[in-house]
Amino acid sequence: MEQLLCAITGMDNFTMQPLAGAHGELTGVMMMAAYHKAKGNKKKYIIIPDSAHGTNPATAAIAGYEIISVPSDKHGVMSLDELKKNLSDEVAGLMITCPDTHGIFHSQIDEIARLVHSVDGLMYYDGANLNAVLGRFRPGDVGFDVMHINLHKTFSTPHGGGGPGSGPVGVTKKLVPYLPVSRVIKRADGTCALNYDYPDSIGYIASFYGNFGIILRAYAYILLLGKEGLKETTDHAVLNANYIRGRLKDHFELAYDRLCMHEAVFSASRQAKRGVHALDIAKFLIDEGIHPPTVYFPLTVKESIMVEPTESESRQTIDHFIEVMLKIDELSKTQPEAVTDRPRSTPVSRPDEVKAARDVNTNYFGKG
Ligand SMILES: *Cc1c(COP(=O)(O)O)cnc(C)c1O
């Protein structure tokens, strides 16, 4: 599996230990810190685009860095000018998702890598959106030094599915000495063994060998599809997202009106003016038997609805989703209260979410 992931990403080595994407980030950034420490570099900052997933700044902070947030430009990608303004010798590296959470691929990613490397910073690739580029783009080929893959998002589980997760981390040669122990090695006679003898390793990250079941499922998926099959999943993921984008764009505002990769980000701001917010739309979808898309993320888009159909939804399911979304738009004009009192088909309709978070009742299904 390590070898397959190297071939897919252009990395030189992988650790399968991390238990989720966020855990992979922490593993990766700890290795970045170990690299700078070994070189005697004085580093203080990690640069992160404003469209990033919240785990990126959280990881950098836990690893002891301060965060510099770089705004997106009018095309929806990290501004190169703003990046240049913030680069200094104190920059430890940059964490970026590509395509980013706006569903847009940064066409100047190689230039970004060159700039970050010019201050001996390291490039971290957040691989959560890897299913947009499988077989077409390898982070290792454009200068990324370290990355995680969310196996539970890209390989056989439609975007996460609630977990459990697995976040293998890949590195290029620069960072190999810092990989977690133990590591699987192949002996001269072809048999495998565990090696613990890596004095610069950051140590254990998880018990042997991470979330094994998820790794096994992803392994089977990769073997089953092969190189061409994986490319095809990406084609379908991107086509499905653009189909939805095209059919809904006259009714729901687009965050960025351009072709997208594997996800289309809409804004419900028109509907919100009529009293129907992104949250209401998500709740309505539940009644129609649809798992709602992510709402209010990315934070850069007001009333955002991020639709990621993945490669695995059928035309029929996608058309059903589109029809329901069109119905919601229509209702927002004629009868908004028919949307805002949903869901009706669930045991609990609209919980007080603040109270639910602060005052958890673990005894809901019965007394004692
Ligand atoms: C999901 C996600 C993460 C975190 O991954 P988990 O496996 O949920 O910990 C990080 N970055 C991006 C862009 C994501 O979508």
Image: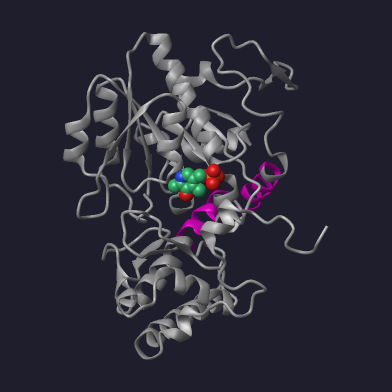
Q: Residue at x 55, y 70 (%)?
A: 350
Residue 135 in sight from this viewpoint: no
Is 274 in front, or is 115? 274
**For the view shown, which residue lies furthest in the bottom direction?**
334
Question: With respect to residue 252, does 265 lie above or below?
Answer: above
Residue 305: x %, y % from top left: 40, 65
Is 214 in front, or is 87? 87
Q: Quadrant of the C terminus?
A: bottom right
Question: With respect to residue 25, does 275 lie above or below?
Answer: below
Q: Residue at x 64, y 10 (%)?
A: 197
Q: Quadrant of residue 306?
A: bottom left
Is 322 in front, or is 272? 272
- Tell whether position 147 is magenta: no
Q: Quadrant of the N terminus?
A: top right
Residue 351 in sight from this viewpoint: yes
Residue 142: x %, y % from top left: 34, 35
Numbered disc total = 0
Specify the principal SS of the magenta part. Answer: helix
Question: With respect to residue 300, does 338 lie above or below?
Answer: below
Q: Residue at x 64, y 54 (%)?
A: 360
Q: Quadrant of residue 198?
A: top right
Residue 201: x %, y % from top left: 56, 15
- Tell whether position 218 is magenta: yes
Residue 69: x %, y % from top left: 29, 39
Report the span colored magenta. Answer: 215-236
